[in-house]
Image (cartoon, rainbow, N blue to C red):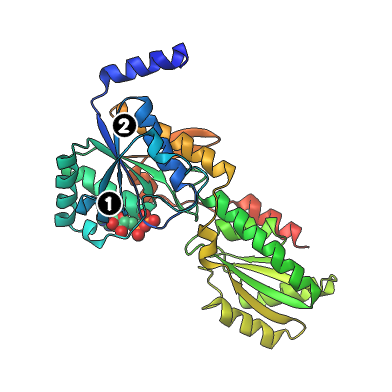
Amino acid sequence: MGYRLFLQLFIKNMKNTIKKIAVLTSGGDAPGMNAAIRSVVRTCAFHNIECVGVYRGYQGMIEGDFEPMNARSVRNIVSRGGTMLKSARADEFKTKEGRKKAHEQLKKEGVDAFVVVGGDGSFTGALLFNNEFGFPVMGIPGTIDNDIYGTNYTLGYDTALNTAVDVIDKIRDTASSHHRLFFVEVMGRDVGHIALNVGIGGGAEEILIPEENVGLDRLLDSLRESKKAGKTSSIVVVAEGDKIGKTVFELAEYVEENFPFYEVRVSVLGHMQRGGAPSCFDRVLASRMGVKAVESLMEGKSNLMVGIKDDKIELTELELAIKGKSKINAELLRVSDIMAI
Ligand code: ADP
């Protein structure tokens, strides 16, 4: 260990009152969650803080489903998708009685603080928990949708983009072998970050996102223009929360009826976007976020989410992270229009 690190460790331990930290993954799983667990566990080990893993999110917390973790408990997980601690939806945690049970379990276990890797639902639970019991909490954003305010990237988003763009490349091969129009639905109920990025990266002719209602007429016009411009196949990337069609299948049906030039096909990528080995970007991000989460708790901080802005790890109030809206990148919208000429 270098002298500088040793000195930092010494100073931190002098004022640290946090002796045991719990880590859990909650809500929808995302690639990179394992790397975040590993980072929290190893940062605790580095600072001589005990660490326990909580299985199945807040449900496991209510039931006291804990396991002591050390640096070796998290070997070989940095490259694995999913979460070794499992994730769960825990409706009981939405009630005061449920949170009280969870608090009793943490106290019984001697835990002083927790780090939750999850989305805004998980952060809402953490904040309520802190308000009720004065218990220090820290959030790490883990969701493929990238829909959390206060960070340029959430864990799993970069991996999901790479997975989706890979599939679109494959679909293009079959689309271009026939006169086919493919509607490819990607994840994103409320936000179109995945659709916009994989649409550009995968060379889509149109990208339909919840933030912009293109309208059926403009979509048909655009497809007619594409044909006039000499395109014999097309890919339209649709975010699942797109507002034009009720479903991507109804949208496809409408286009097929009104624009018979193409055979229309639909491909819904679904849960495959959540799986797979995390990208290097997500692994590094998770490692950085875990270190910051633990060291911030050691400094007496709480109710914060660790995020990344302009390649700097920064903290945002959990309340803001929950209430704020992540915005679609206007420059990317323009780029996608130009690329589709
Ligand atoms: P995400 O964290 O990905 O947004 P959810 O919305 O499903 O996923 O939330 C995950 C868990 O967080 C829930 O199962 C529940 O235990 C807890 N949670 C969500 N919303 C609240 C809330 N309003 N109050 C307390 N706990 C909540």
Q: State the SS at label 2.
A: helix
Total numbered circles = 2
The residue at the point 67 percent across, 69 percent down is: 236
Q: Quadrant of residue 280?
A: top right
Which residue is the site of mark 1? 125
Return the residue nearer the eye: 98 or 71: 71
Residue at the image position 25 percent from the left and 29 percent from the top: 18
Mark 1 belongs to which amino acid?
Answer: Gly
Upstream in sequence: badge 1 or badge 2: 1
Q: Residue at x 37, y 52 (%)?
A: 120
In the image, residue 171 above or below residue 286: below
Q: Is mark 1 within 8 Å of ligand 1?
A: yes
The spot of residue 237 in percent (x, y) is: 63, 66
Between 310 and 47, the one lying in front of the other is 47
- Which mark identifies residue 297? 2
- Residue 90 in percent (x, y) is at 27, 59
Where residue 169 sits, quadrant-wise, is bottom right
> In 3D space, how far apart are the residues under numbered discs 1 and 2 (Cα atoms)?
18 Å
Position of the N terminus, as image quadrant, is: top left
Give the quadrant of the C terminus.
bottom right
Question: Furthest residue to the bottom?
Answer: 257
Ligand 1, seen in the image, is in the quarter at bottom left
Q: Residues within 10 Å of mark 1 (few under 14, many from 20)?
A: some
